[in-house]
Image (cartoon, rainbow, N blue to C red):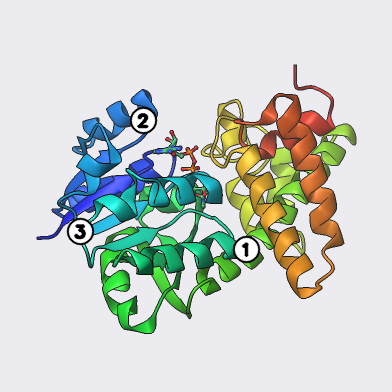
């Protein structure tokens, strides 16, 4: 069985790497955060002290890191993945990094004889936990079937979108919809609360009505409406506010490149950034409702 490496053992990387262990693989993991390493070790991940140690014997390297600059650094620095992996190793990055970083990384990997596959995901920590993620693969077509096979234990819909940048393009468009939905769900919740609605009853109404949407059902911003939602555990992430702001920014940047006007995304990005900069950074993005209600402190 191939040996695998997993870089970035956070809210998504932890449950995802755990499924590979359950599928029978040996997984060497690496994270800069000691707590993340400890939690992964408890799942059976063999924790490495350096990137080079994690990837040296790996046939496939996965990464699930916060942003494009993190992934670019981990992949391309002198002691990073591309310099340390064996020639021909497949590197599957599942992070949301945007189209430009993805394109750059395909070129840089190629120069080092490594196969880069972008495979951003949708489905949240719930999808990571249940292995029901949707993957959006961008790579050379000849590598798509191996990439799909290696992602099989983690998801239930694995799409080959096309060449370099296309997986990230699909993810950026998806998260434009999701990011704006989360923002308006928070605004609607703040309004409902101020109007004195019973938010549990409103949830029953809305999820049977024209307001229904995925993030309203899974990540309802009102506490104790959806037991598993971040709002019901003090807004512990989930999907961190700064990561949602990052994704909205990626959409806005992509829009500028092709001349698409994204005015609702700009307002959502402004609100999420404001909340992130005033204490909401690592809280779940649905804690925007606290910011809107002026009740963060
Ligand atoms: P997270 O912050 O929980 O985890 C990221 C991990 O990467 C952390 O443990 C951090 O210590 C580690 N890390 C950061 N820099 C590193 C480095 N240089 N070397 C090694 N490890 C490093 O974030 P997350 O929620 O797991 O998100 C990861 C990616 O997945 C992001 O791109 C995010 O946009 C995307 N994503 C998240 C969700 C979600 O619901 N949380 C859903 C879909 C996609």
Quadrant of the rendered structure where residue 3 is?
Answer: bottom left
Instruction: Report whether residue 208 is seen.
Output: no
Disc 1: which residue: 172
How far apart in space, not on screen, are marks 2 and 3 (Cα)? 26 Å
- Residue 7: % across, % down: 34, 44
Give the structural element (helix, strand or loop) at label 1.
helix
Q: Of marks 1 and 2, which one's residue comes earlier in the chain?
A: 2
Quadrant of the rendered structure where residue 50 is?
Answer: top left
Disc 3: which residue: 86
Q: Quadrant of the C terminus?
A: top right
Q: Are marks 1 and 2 in contact (CB under 8 Å)?
A: no
How far apart in space, not on screen, are marks 3 and 1 (Cα)? 31 Å
Viewer-proximal residue among 222 and 74: 74
Q: Which residue lies most toward the left here?
A: 1
Q: Are marks 2 and 3 in contact (CB under 8 Å)?
A: no
Quadrant of the rendered structure where residue 117 is?
Answer: bottom left
Q: Residues within 10 Å of mark 1 (few under 14, many from 20)?
A: many
- Eyeballing the image, is 261 above or below 85? below
Q: Could you say which disc has been placed on residue 23 in the image?
A: none
Q: Of marks 3 and 1, which one's residue comes earlier in the chain?
A: 3
Q: Quadrant of the N terminus?
A: bottom left
Q: Residues within 10 Å of mark 2 (few under 14, many from 20)?
A: some
Disc 2: which residue: 36
Note whether ligand 1 is within 8 Å of mark 2. Answer: yes
How far apart in space, not on screen, are marks 1 and 2 (Cα)? 27 Å
Give the structural element (helix, strand or loop) at label 2.
helix
């Amino acid at each position: 069985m191939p040996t695998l490496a997993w870089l970035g053992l956070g809210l998504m990387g932890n449950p995802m790497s755990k499924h590979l262990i359950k599928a029978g693989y040996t997984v060497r993991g690496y994270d800069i955060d000691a707590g993340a390493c400890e939690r992964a070790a408890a799942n059976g991940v063999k924790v490495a002290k350096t990137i080079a140690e994690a990837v040296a014997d790996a046939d496939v390297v996965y990464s699930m890191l916060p942003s494009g600059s993190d992934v670019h650094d981990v992949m391309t620095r002198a002691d990073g993945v591309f310099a340390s992996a064996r020639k021909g190793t497949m590197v599957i990055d599942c992070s949301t990094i945007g189209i430009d970083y993805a394109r750059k990384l395909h070129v840089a990997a190629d120069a080092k004889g490594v196969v880069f596959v972008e495979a951003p995901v949708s489905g949240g920590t719930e999808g990571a936990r249940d292995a029901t993620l949707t993957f959006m693969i961008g790579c050379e077509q000849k590598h798509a079937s191996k990439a799909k096979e290696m992602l099989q234990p983690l998801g239930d819909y694995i799409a080959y979108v096309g060449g370099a940048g296309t997986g990230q393009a699909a993810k950026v468009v998806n998260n434009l919809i999701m990011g704006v939905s989360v923002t308006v769900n928070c605004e609607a919740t703040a309004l409902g609360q101020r109007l004195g609605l019973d938010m549990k009853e409103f949830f029953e109404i809305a999820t049977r009505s024209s307001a229904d949407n995925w993030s309203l059902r899974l990540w309802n911003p009102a506490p104790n409406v959806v037991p598993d939602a971040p709002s019901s555990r003090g807004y512990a992430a989930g999907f961190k506010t700064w990561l949602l702001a990052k994704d909205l920014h990626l959409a806005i940047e992509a829009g500028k490149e092709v001349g698409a006007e994204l005015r609702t995304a700009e307002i959502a990005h402004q609100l999420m950034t404001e909340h992130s900069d005033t204490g909401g950074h690592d809280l779940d993005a649905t804690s925007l409702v606290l910011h809107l209600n002026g009740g963060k402190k």
